[in-house]
Image (cartoon, helix red, strand yellow):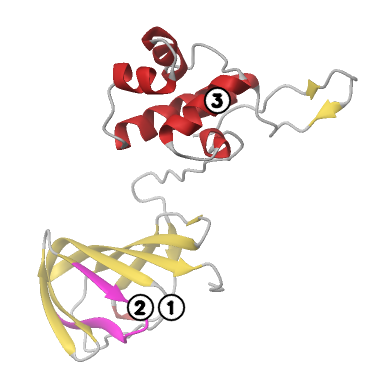
Amino acid sequence: MTTPDRAILHDTSGREVPRDTPTGVDLERAIAHQVRALRLASGLSVGDMATKVGISKAMLSKIENAQTSCSLSTLARLAAGLDVPVTSLFRGADAHREAVFTKSGQGAEIVGRGTRAGHHYELLGALRGQHQRLEPVLVTLTDASDIFPLFQHPGTELLYMLEGEMVYGHGDSEYRLTAGDSLLLDGEGVHGPNELVTLPIRFLAVTAYPDNHQG
């Protein structure tokens, strides 16, 4: 889902400010989210946290609901009470969060090993995070075949069976997978289907590649 671009902002001298610059509302929301999350992680109630920090319960409630702007002294108190750096309270204020939505049957088709043998690969999107690229693929096997492509790649892969039954190999091991079963594996080990037991077979393969992998 996309959102419209922000209006052009200007600072007090009239200079244009980049549209990604966090606004006061962004900061209030980021602080609200972080304070609440850190308080809950510490096991403190609103009242306990307010007493510890030295502010009123009503003020802390407003902060956690992004209904007020914090002064620097209040931010310092909050950070001290939560035992975190002040900068951690702003985490997420200037970060662009991505999402990829793919309608059923509209993912990009991947043509690769096994395609001619009745193996269909549908890419459901890809996101690159701070340390990895996440790539989900819907795999459909419709034809019995003696051709079983093998894969080997950096990163970690999760298989989740949706339909059918197959024997899947990873290194020297084999796993019989039916609907609802999952297999988490090290992508560096050679892996792939060894036997197609009940067709059609559909499974979701989600791979987390390291950030230095060129896919």
1 left or right of 12 in image: left
How far apart marks 3 and 2 lie (CA) works out to 44 Å
Residue 135: quadrant of the picture: bottom left
Residue 2, given in percent of the width and then of the height, sits at 54, 33
Q: Mark 1 points at which residue?
A: 154
Of labels 1 and 2, earlier in sequence is 1
How far apart marks 1 and 2 lie (CA) works out to 5 Å
* Residue at figure coordinates x 29%, y 66% from the top left: 139
The answer to which of 181 and 115 lies nearer the viewer is: 181
Range drawn in magenta = 183-196
> Could you tell me which secondary element the residue under label 3 belongs to?
helix
- In the picture as drawn, the residue positioned furthest to the bottom comes out as 172
Q: What residue type is labelled 3?
A: Leu
> Could you tell me which secondary element the residue under label 2 belongs to?
loop
Report the predominant secondary structure element of the magenta stretch. Answer: strand
175 left or right of 83 in image: left
Q: Please say if 76 is above or below 168.
A: above
Residue 52, given in percent of the width and then of the height, sits at 38, 23
* Residue at figure coordinates x 13%, y 78% from the top left: 175
